[in-house]
Amino acid sequence: MRYSKNSFIVIIFSVLCFMLSSTAYAKELPVLKNVEVAVDINYDGDDLYEYSYTVTNPEDNTGLIWSISLDVSTDEDRVKLSSRGLYVKQIYTYKNELWFKSFDDMVVHLGELLKEQMVPVGTDFPNNWRSGLSVDGEVAWGSRKKEYRIHPGQSQGGLYVISRGLPGIRDIIIKPKWTFMTEGSVTKEDIEYSRETKKKIAFYGKTIGPVAPLKAFKSIDFIDYLMDLKHKAEDYGWIRIEGAQGIIQSLDQKLENAKEKIERGDGIAAKNILEAFLKEVEAQGCDSQDCPSDKHLLPEAYALLKFNAEYLIDNL
């Protein structure tokens, strides 16, 4: 099983002399658009989900990807999931040695700096990268060396999260490497400019990550949530629309019928309809990015619909 490291926040200042100005910024900001994030989700049959991410930097970009942050925050209204067996793989910076630290120990290490509660996770990273947990309630990956960053036209896999959290839609922030440059003392204005510029040039996207279910389970609310996941999967391109209108309508109709049965208090009938929904999802879905063209549910949509439908069935 795969796991990984704590957070890093890096601001690098380098001195470059310009003749015409006492303060200067990089003339051209790196372009980072349309970054692709693909994820495969595997369930171990017990209670752990493994999320495996691959990030692709389009060749027409100019920015080199060096930092990737996935939101795994949670709150008091949601179930407190177990952290048992979840470890973060660490690297001693100077010795370059690997070791493991539990999720709970990592949270203790972040201490009062931690701004958000997190769904318990384990993490892993590819060679020449590192990863960990941030004070903002994120899993963060990054590469310190230029040659190992994700250059335009390249992809990087091996970015892992392991959790008991159900697949849900999560924010992901991907940053290009950009160096603030100044001559002389750094002012407050310089720092603010650097901070705002880094926000501006980052890529903000959506992917699948672990989510803790609400403590107060209500079947009618959860089927509404499942229906919303299905619609958003269409919006985010995780359902191949071409030639799939009949399939989409069929899935929608089954969810509507199940909702009607739940509203009437007929849990048995609702389960039967949802079981038929699951069979259609499994027939039309892929559990890996190597997805045949005749399948319409990419791994993101497949995981969202399959595992959340199973959770609903189990709790009806």
Image (cartoon, grey):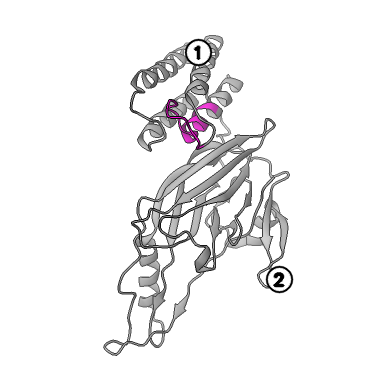
Q: What type is the residue that disc 2 sits on?
A: Lys
**Crowd class of label 2 (few under 14; some 14 to 19; many from 20; radius 10 Å):** few
Res 170 visible: no
- Identify which residue is drawn at 39% across, 65% down: 198
Q: Earlier in the sequence, mark 1 or mark 2?
A: 2
| Location of residue 119 (image quadrant) | top right
User: Which percent across, then down, holds residue 19?
Assistant: 29, 90
Which residue is label 1 attached to? 273
**Few, some or many residues within 10 Å of mark 1 (<14, 14–19, 20+):** many
Q: Is residue 4 magenta?
A: no
Give residue 98's quadrant in the image: bottom right
Query: Can you give x and y, in whole percent of width and height, for residue 312 in the image?
Result: 55, 23
Residue 112 x, y percent position in the rendering: 60, 61
Dot in front, 1 or 2: 2
SS class of the residue under badge 1? helix
How far apart, in angstroms, are the residues tagged by discs 1 and 2? Answer: 57 Å
In what quadrant of the picture does the N terminus appear? top right
Q: Is residue 293 magenta?
A: yes
What residue would you read off at disc 2? 95
Q: Which mark is residue 75?
A: none
Q: Residue furthest left?
A: 20
Tell me the element at label 2: loop
- Foreground of the two, 28 or 173: 28
Give x and y (percent) for residue 260.
43, 13
Q: Residue furthest bottom?
A: 19
- Foreground pick, 28 / 49: 28
Residue in view at x 49 percent, y 22 percent: 281
Is residue 38 positioned above or below 304 on the image? below
Residue 193 is left or right of residue 271, and the answer is: left
Looking at the image, do the residues carrying marks 1 and 2 touch, with CB atoms under 8 Å apart?
Answer: no
Report the magenta residues as a range: 289-306
